[in-house]
């Protein structure tokens, strides 16, 4: 089995680095030549990719909040109950309003209202009263 070559071995004493030289400093550009090239490019339809100079910042109008504030009833529905699972159900507008009205009328949270609705449905199916 062969071993991997070490980067620290002494076998590289014959390495000649005399040919490596630092890059020469770039010569400064002639501003007239740069302007001529830019003018020619723009006249032919080529557009610069350089960022446009920053314009003065315009005052930003602060808009009123788009959403209506949360109603008191909705705030009462939000409380810590230990329920940590989410159930998303598509319902009609009328069904949703009826569900919220039932929860608000009895002071129940939405999770509690759902649990009571399940218990009532199960009682109706099995014939047992809740």
Image (cartoon, rainbow, N blue to C red):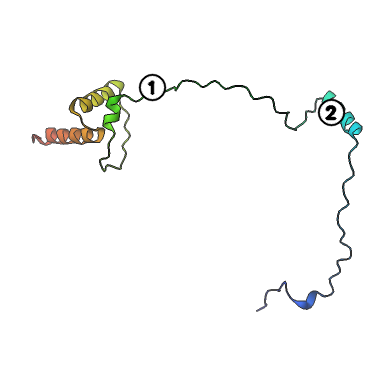
Identify residue for label 1.
Answer: 68
Q: Circle 2 is placed at which residue position?
A: 41
Residue 74 screen position, x and y as percent? 29, 27
Q: Residue shown at 11%/36% (left/top)?
A: 126
The quadrant of the image that shows the N terminus is: bottom right
The answer to the question of whether label 1 and label 2 lie on touching residues, with beta carbons closer than 8 A, is: no
Q: Quadrant of residue 109?
A: top left
Q: What residue do we see at 27% from left, 31% from top? A: 77
Q: Residue 86, which numbered label?
A: none
Which one is in front in this view, the residue at disc 1 or the one at disc 2? Answer: 1
In the picture, the quarter occupied by the C terminus is top left
- Residue at 21% of width from left, 35% of height from top? 112
Q: Is residue 104 above or below residue 119?
A: above
Residue 128: x, y in percent? 8, 36
Q: Earlier in the sequence, mark 1 or mark 2?
A: 2
Image quadrant where residue 129 sits: top left
Q: Secondary structure at mark 1?
A: loop
- Relative horizontal placement of residue 65, taking residue 89 as reference (left or right): right
- Residue 24 in the figure: left or right of residue 68: right
Q: How packed is label 1: few (under 14 Cα within 10 Å), some, or many (20 or more)?
A: few
Image: 3 above or below 58:
below
Residue 6: x and y in percent read 71, 74
CA distance for labels 1 and 2:
53 Å
Tell me which residue sits at (89%, 39%) in the image: 29
The image quadrant of residue 39 is top right
């Amino acid at each position: 089995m062969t071993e991997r070559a070490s980067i620290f071995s002494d076998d590289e004493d014959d390495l000649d680095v005399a040919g490596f030289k630092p890059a020469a400093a770039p010569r400064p550009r002639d501003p007239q030549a740069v302007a001529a090239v830019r003018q020619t490019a723009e006249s032919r339809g080529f557009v610069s990719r350089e960022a446009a100079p920053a314009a003065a910042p315009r005052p930003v109008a602060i808009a009123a909040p788009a959403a209506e504030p949360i109603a008191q009833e909705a705030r009462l529905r939000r409380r810590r109950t230990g329920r940590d699972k989410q159930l998303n159900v598509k319902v009609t507008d009328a069904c949703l309003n009826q569900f919220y009205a039932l929860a608000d009328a009895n002071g129940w949270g939405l999770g509690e209202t759902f649990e009571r609705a399940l218990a009532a449905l199960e009682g109706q199916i099995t014939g047992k009263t809740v």
